[in-house]
Image (cartoon, helix red, strand yellow):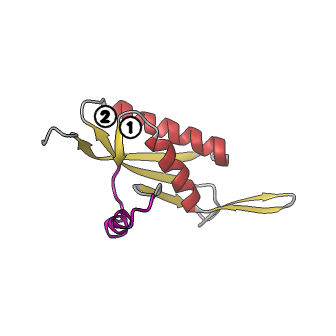
Amino acid sequence: MPKTVETSLGKVQIAEEVVAKIAGMAALECPGLAGMAPRRQVMDRLNEVLRRENLERGVDVQIGPNGDDVKVGLYIIVQYGVNIYDTAVNVQERVADALNRYIGMDNTQIHVYVQGVDFGDTNR
């Protein structure tokens, strides 16, 4: 369900996909983040084969019926050697800031799920 805001001029609706893209872009800017983990593996693999950029990958957005209850789940892969907790908190803070700045969402729950560690070329 999209987030809907009533104004004196009418309604403004923001789709869950827009929230997911903003959250995904903000998360990918965080140091220590190797990437996002796929949530829908079949579609993500198809997108990789077709070489489509997908900022929604690894992001799950749920907006309640009134548009007030917004939950964002981010499924991330961190780089080896970084502090995982600090990286996850940084992702939460950056995503919260971006959603507040671009959409005005200031009461959003942001859950980070660390799904893996990228060891780079170390073959571990």
Q: Is residue 18 above or below residue 101?
A: below
Q: Is residue 85 above or below residue 21?
A: above
Q: Is residue 55 magenta?
A: no
At numbered mark 1, what does the secondary structure look like: helix, strand or loop? helix
Residue flagged by tag 1: what amino acid is it? Ala
- Looking at the image, the residue that sits furthest to the right is 8
Crowding at label 2, few (<14), some or many (≥20) Cα neighbours within 10 Å?
some
Which residue was labeled with disc 1?
Answer: 88
Look at 58% across and 42% down and name the residue there. Answer: 98
Can you say which quadrant of the picture contains the N terminus?
Answer: bottom right
Asked whether residue 70 is in view, the answer is no
Q: Is residue 25 above or below residue 1?
A: above
At numbered mark 2, what does the secondary structure look like: helix, strand or loop? helix
Q: Is residue 51 magenta?
A: yes
Figure label count: 2
Which residue was labeled with disc 2?
Answer: 84
Residue flagged by tag 2: what amino acid is it? Ile
Asked whether residue 122 is in view, the answer is yes
CA gap, disc 2 to disc 1? 6 Å
Can you say which quadrant of the picture contains the C terminus?
Answer: top left
Q: Is the residue under label 1 in contact with that under label 2 (CB below 8 Å)?
A: yes
* Range of magenta residues: 36-53
Look at 65% across and 45% down and name the residue there. Answer: 102
The spot of residue 69 in percent (x, y) is 58, 55
